[in-house]
Image: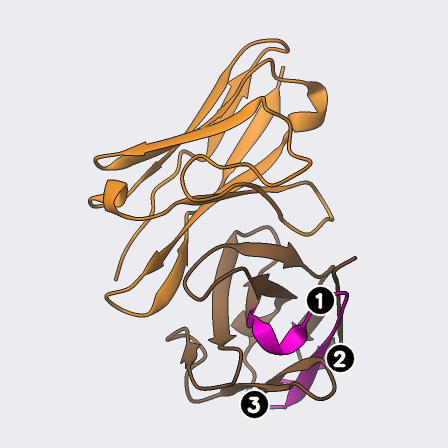
Amino acid sequence: EVQLVESGGGLIKPGGSLRLSCAASGFTFSSYSLTWVRQAPGQGLEWVASISSSSTYIYYADSVKGRFTISRDNGKNSLNLQMNSLRAEDTAVYYCARDQNWGSRFDYWGQGTLVTVSS
Amino acid sequence: SYVLTQPPSVSVAPGQTARITCGGNNIGSKSVHWYQQKPGQAPVLVVYDDSDRPSGIPERFSGSNSGNTATLTISRVEAGDEADYYCQVWDSSSDRWVFGGGTKLTVL
């Protein structure tokens, strides 16, 4: 069974940093691209960043480019999102998702982790 | 950047057919995916590549895509279908994944 479990969320002050992780199991981790999607309270889904299976391709939404860094460790079946210079508008539930194919659908999602940026 | 437009809400009586649209410039040339999200839960893929269904998704869920509009159709709507629905595409011109704003389906 495919499982994606996010961790690392919490309350952080504006300007602070936070590192999210996503532990994967139930599939060959190194064969799939992975993505972070976020959802602000009461709002819709927003794509954040994606990384290809071997980290060759990495893309970011304009709203986080230069502040967030996506990475993966294929040896540990782990996806990460380093978030720096956090802003109030980064407050959201962050989901990790598996890409069936690069540029395709997100076929499995984690349950999400809440990040709250507030003083 | 590529924009997907969905109606904020759609209402339908139980047993009827719900149609949720997703508009985008020449969206018919792209593969459209649809997600269902119930309150407090993660999104679930219900239709991919315009009209295919993942295993476990009822046949009542179907999709189409042509011209500037993609449509998610839910036949014989049930109370349990009440949720937010999002369309999504890959915009190859900008290397971005794009979501529509979401449609809240209300079962009357």
Crowdedness of circle 2 by 10 Å Cα count: few (<14), some, many (20+)? some
Quadrant of the image occupied by residue B78 = top right
Residue at 64 percent of width and 11 percent of height: B14
Left or right: A86 with respect to B69? right
Label 3 close to label 1 by CB (< 8 Å)? no
Quadrant of the image occupied by residue B81 = top right
Kindly state the secondary structure of the residue where label 3 is placed: loop
**Residue A91 at x, y = what percent?**
61, 69
**Residue A26 belongs to the span the image colors magenta:** yes
Residue at 71 percent of width and 89 percent of height: A75
Q: Chain of mark 1?
A: A
List the residue tagged with mark 2: A8
**Residue B103 at x, y = what percent?**
49, 36
Left or right: B100 with respect to B77? left
Q: CA distance from mark 3 to mark 2?
A: 14 Å
From where the camera sits, is residue A81 visible?
Answer: yes
**Residue A80 at x, y = what percent?**
64, 83
Q: What chain is the orange one?
A: B
Kindly state the secondary structure of the residue where label 1 is placed: loop
- Residue A67, compared with residue B71, is above or below; it is below
Q: What chain is the brown one?
A: A
Q: Earlier in the sequence, mark 1 or mark 2?
A: 2
**Residue B72 belongs to the span the image colors magenta:** no
* Label placed on residue A27: 1
Crowdedness of circle 3 by 10 Å Cα count: few (<14), some, many (20+)? some
